[in-house]
Image (cartoon, grey):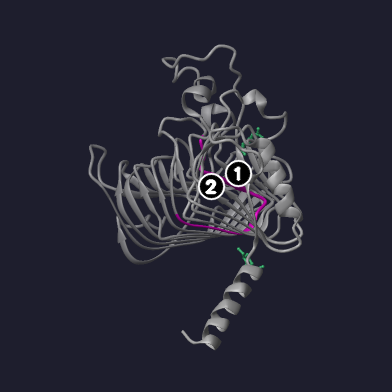
Amino acid sequence: MNGSKSTLVLATFMFMVVSQAHVFDITKFGVKPGGEISKALCDAWRAACNAPKPSKLIIPKGQFCLNSIEFKGPCKAPVEVRIDAIIIGPKDPKVIPKGKQWITFSYVNGMTVSGCGTLDGLGGAMAWPSNNPKKNAHHKKPCGLQYLLQNLSFNFIQNSLITGITTKDSKNFHANVMSCTNVTFDNIHIIAPHDSPNTDGIHLGWSKHITIKNSVIKTGDDCISIGDGCENLRIEGVKCGPGHGISVGSLGRNPGEKPVRGVFVKNCVFSCTQNGVRIKTWPDSLPGEVADMHFEDLKMDKVENPIIIEQDYCPHGACSKSKPSLVKVHKVFIKNIKGTATTPTVVKLRCSKANNGCENVRISDIHLTYHGPHGPARQECCNVRPIYAGKMVPPGCPIK
Ligand SMILES: *[C@@H]1O[C@H](CO)[C@@H](O)[C@H](O)[C@H]1NC(C)=O
Ligand SMILES: *[C@@H]1O[C@H](CO)[C@@H](O)[C@H](O)[C@H]1NC(C)=O
């Protein structure tokens, strides 16, 4: 290498060092291997968040305990949080301050959470017995342990990317995404036993422009649930199951609910789930709206209800089915759905009789089979007249 070339290489190297993000490694903040990191993490976050240039907070490989943390913005510049460690939640949930969550990200604009770490909420034996005492009666309840929900929360996050993380056995909903805009979840793994109650994978509410892609979600409840006020959601390349599938709703119960508009579920696989894609609203409800639903290129493997609109959703008889749901469901596009079902009604559209039923429902290219004792596969339509196109197995509902 001649002189001028090596100068150039050196100059380039210097430039890269200077332009690189400022790094805050929590092991430089008084953390011992295996130790509890709440304070160190809080200090490191404050430093990273206050840095005037883009910065990086690193939780390196290893195992740490974490009672709770709030990564709170706004920050002065974009921050990356890199988690390569296994982070274990508290055995005693009482250490989480009242009204707080286990891990919260809030009010940050331009955040990346990355790494190959695991967030282990220590759900299992600790929390679920008290969550569902009947079902888990055989578990021994540790004495004096109080049940407390432990969620991973994203509140008011904008323009951010969450990638590569595994969360395991969180004590309740795994990830709550509230009032967020333009956030992508890529390559996320969420795992909880199939019989763990209320362990939704990701719950979205009041959020816009959210993408969830290339992810695996195995839980005891909904893989993804979508609450009111959500707009423009893309769910792509998600493997869901076991669990209850991808659900919009339930809606119509609370006053002031905002519409759900623009949900794209594409290229997803559902294995052994209760539902594939579902829209559920309460009967005898307050007004609301669900519009612009796109369910496309989905594969069902032994799914109870591959496609289901349930406007008479009334679990445990907690409502009156005699009055219809006032949530208007319209513009629903269902396209290229293939696979196997474990009940004969493979497409179930139980729309409300209010507001002219479901309107502008288009279904094309269905191939869903059922091989069982309850007769041939069929589609059911109630207060809806879908427009069919392409191949239809089983055939669409007869025009009445
Ligand atoms: C966890 O999330 C669920 C669902 O959004 C919510 O009902 C619950 O209140 C949350 N837990 C806490 C402690 O806030
Ligand atoms: C959305 O967020 C990403 C970062 O994840 C950013 O690169 C992009 O510019 C944002 N889009 C808009 C429209 O702000």
- Where's residue 70, x and y in %? 69, 42
* Residue occupying image coordinates x 72% and y 28%: 98
Name the residue carrying label 2.
Answer: 60
Check if mark 2's residue and mark 1's residue have beta carbons within 8 Å. Answer: yes
Some atom of ligand 2 lies within 8 Å of the CB belonging to the residue at label 1 = no
Whether residue 97 is situated above or below residue 22 in the rendered picture: above
Identify which amino acid the numbered label 2 is placed on.
Pro
Q: Could you tell me which residue is drawn at 59 percent across and 31 percent down?
A: 320
Q: Position of residue 275 (x, y in %)?
A: 42, 44
Mark 2 crowd level (few <14, some 14–19, many ≥20, 10 Å Cα)? some
Disc 2 or 1, which lies upstream in sequence? 1
**Of the two numbered discs 2 and 1 in the rendering, the one whose residue sits closer to the viewer:** 1
Q: Which residues are magenta?
A: 199-214
Give the numbered dot on residue 27: 1
Q: Is residue 332 left or right of residue 108?
A: left
Counting other residues with Cα less than 10 Å from the Cα at mark 1, is it few (<14), some (14-19), or many (20 or more)? some
Give the quarter of the figure containing the C terminus. Answer: bottom left
Instruction: Name the chief secondary structure element in magenta.
Output: strand
Element carrying mark 2: loop
